[in-house]
């Protein structure tokens, strides 16, 4: 339980109430720490509510289900998803069925002059709310069905919480409710999630890998394969979504999210050059092992007055004339990915992109009160800023596929598990995430510390 911002977590007995209508109680088997847990614990998240049970990257087994739940049953392996998704029968276009998020985007022109009205809820729809215009649109992986409750730390059925501190006799202290977090709250032996947030896996799924596909690895892979718009065919005659063979890229932040971008760029896109930027020198060896061709530490590798974006532009064909009337030596990468959560770094990531077509994807979550800045000329001259939540993957639909893809070795997954701890040692896991390990952990960078329940 996170009692207050900036405080270590308390490992305490809590009573996890039974699932109500449309809810699922899950026995967590593994949960990992993602930087977003640390972000909310820091107090910088405007949606951070205390006391709460943090955690959103996990895998487990359904223990019981509430009234009306049909898509999962006790004994099923599941991944709790912080983005919900309506799944099931008909009526709403590609988005409802999920489709293959990695397929190429259809060629333009797409625009529809008037917005079509949404189809009525199909009677066979398996979602609990049965009504989410965002899922039905097919245009986004963001789901509105339970978002207002998950953002408020509550469950939709009664706008209440299923977590209470336990009294000495083991019963729930109703005067001490505990908020949910991101609709998942996985730093608990049991949690309750909405059915629409529960991705059902195959019985043979490896829960350790699956756990990382609840956030970090899926986000990094999806940021590469789903988020950039790619080209419309003007260059090669063939339209394509996102990075393709031979492209160049820069990845800022070599945590699990950034490294999953590197892996996808190398293995799935066939990038010819991937420049990794990280302030932690221990990440160089890891980044190169993941396929990075270059590593830049902005703290030690820049000349006096040089910016990281200027260095990357120079490394990729820039001769310093760009912006000063020159055209010959325009440099920059085709794609960049900000996986730190720092608005200054986001600016560098945009500005290291190639004039005319470079796309920069904001993945990192920056603190409340910070804002992005760049010279609008950067966008006028063809660079584009994009962003992604959960890598654009449609949670309940795509997570089971990702678990299979990981098992087939299409991208790295279990490789990010550098540390494992018990729930009692969760504060040590936060120290590891912040890079503050002791002994061998001080030299071995932590990518993901998994808590084995
Ligand atoms: P992490 O802490 O494991 O990794 C962050 C890395 O950034 C570290 O290697 C650190 O050394 C490096 N770094 C810190 N400051 C830097 C700087 N100024 N320049 C370059 N590198 C710097 O974090 P993670 O779990 O991989 O998450 C990365 C970011 O992505 C976080 O902001 C997290 O909240 C966010 N995130 C977003 C989504 C999403 O859906 N958009 C999903 C998961 C995580
Ligand atoms: N409450 C935060 C939101 C932070 C945020 O952007 N979260 C990402 C997931 S980070 C996972 O590690 C996300 O999916 N956002 C979309 C959504 O619906 O929350 C804040 O800063 O306000
Ligand atoms: Zn996360």
Image (cartoon, helix red, strand yellow):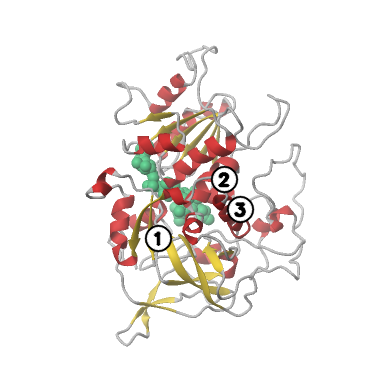
Residue 144, image quadrant? bottom right
x and y percent of residue 146 in the render? 57, 65
| Marks 2 and 1, the one that precedes in the sequence | 1
Label 3 Cα crowd, 10 Å radius (few <14 / some 14-19 / many 20+): many
Q: Residues within 10 Å of mark 1 (few under 14, many from 20)?
A: many
Say which mark, if any, is on residue 141.
3
Pinpoint residue 4: horizontal percent, then vertical percent: 31, 64
Q: Secondary structure at mark 3?
A: loop
Mark 1 or 3: in front is 3
Is label 3 within 8 A of ligand 2 (CB to nearest ligand atom)? no
Crowd tier of the residue under label 2, counting other residues whose Cα lies within 10 Å: few below 14, some 14–19, many 20 or above: some
Can residue 389 be seen at all in this image of the molecule?
no
Q: Position of residue 163 (x, y in %)?
A: 42, 75
- Give above or below for 106 relative to 128: above
**To which quarter of the image does residue 67 belong?**
bottom right
Disc on res. 48: 1
Single out the mark in the foreground, 3 or 2: 2
Judging by the rendered image, the residue that carries numbered circle 2 is: 410
Left or right of 339 on screen, residue 432: left
Label 1 beta carbon within 8 A of ligand 2 = yes
Tag 1, which secondary structure? loop
399 or 231: nearer the viewer: 399
For the residues bearing labels 2 and 1, Cβ distance under 8 angstroms: no
Task: Say whether residue 27 is visible.
Answer: yes
12 or 410: nearer the viewer: 410
Total of numbered circles in the picture? 3
Label 2, ligand 1: CB separation under 8 Å:
no
Q: Please name which of the two marks, 2 or 1, marks the residue nearer to the observer.
A: 2
Q: In terms of secondary structure, where does tag 2 sit?
A: loop
On-image quarter of the C terminus = bottom left
Q: Compared to 77, does 69 lie above or below?
A: below
What residue appears at the point 44 percent right and 19 percent down from the top-left corner? Answer: 314
């Amino acid at each position: 339980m996170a009692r207050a911002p900036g405080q270590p977590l308390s490992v305490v007995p809590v009573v996890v109430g039974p699932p109500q209508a449309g809810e699922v109680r899950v026995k967590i088997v593994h949960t990992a720490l993602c930087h977003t847990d640390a972000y909310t614990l820091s107090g910088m998240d405007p949606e951070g509510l205390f006391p709460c049970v943090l955690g959103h990257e996990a895998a487990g087994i359904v223990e019981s289900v509430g009234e009306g739940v049909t898509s999962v049953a006790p004994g099923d392996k599941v991944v709790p998803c912080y983005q919900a998704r309506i799944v099931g029968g008909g009526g709403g276009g590609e988005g409802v069925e999920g489709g293959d998020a990695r397929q190429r985007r259809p060629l333009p022109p797409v625009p529809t002059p008037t917005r079509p009205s949404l189809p009525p809820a199909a009677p066979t729809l398996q979602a609990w709310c049965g009504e989410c215009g965002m899922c039905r649109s097919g245009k986004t992986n963001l789901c509105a069905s339970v978002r207002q409750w998950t953002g408020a730390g509550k469950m939709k059925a009664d706008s209440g919480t299923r977590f209470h501190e336990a009294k000495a006799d083991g019963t729930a202290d109703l005067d001490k409710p505990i908020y949910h977090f991101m609709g998942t709250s996985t730093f608990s032996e049991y949690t309750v999630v909405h059915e629409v947030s529960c991705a059902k896996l195959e019985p043979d799924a490896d829960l350790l890998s699956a756990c990382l596909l609840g956030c970090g690895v899926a986000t990094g892979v999806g940021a590469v394969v789903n988020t950039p718009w790619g080209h419309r065919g003007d260059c090669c005659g063939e339209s394509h979504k996102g990075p393709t063979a031979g492209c160049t890229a820069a990845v800022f932040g070599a945590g699990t999210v950034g490294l999953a971008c590197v892996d996808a760029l190398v293995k799935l896109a066939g990038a010819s050059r991937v420049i990794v930027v990280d302030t932690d020198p221990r990440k160089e060896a890891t980044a190169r092992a993941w396929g990075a061709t270059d590593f830049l530490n902005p703290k030690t590798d820049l000349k006096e007055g040089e910016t990281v974006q200027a260095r990357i532009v120079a490394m990729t064909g820039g001769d310093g004339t760009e912006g000063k009337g020159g055209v010959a030596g325009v440099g920059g990468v085709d794609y960049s990915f900000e996986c730190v959560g720092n608005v200054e770094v986001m600016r560098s990531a945009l500005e290291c992109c190639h004039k005319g077509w470079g796309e920069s994807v904001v993945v990192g979550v920056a603190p409340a009160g910070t804002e992005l800045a760049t010279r609008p000329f950067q966008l006028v001259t063809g660079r584009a800023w994009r962003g992604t939540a959960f890598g654009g993957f449609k949670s309940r639909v795509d997570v089971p596929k990702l678990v299979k893809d990981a098992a087939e070795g299409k991208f790295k997954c279990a490789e990010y598990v550098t540390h494992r701890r018990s729930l009692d040692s969760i504060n040590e896991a936060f120290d590891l995430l912040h890079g503050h390990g002791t002994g061998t952990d001080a030299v071995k960078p932590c990518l993901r510390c998994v808590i084995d329940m």
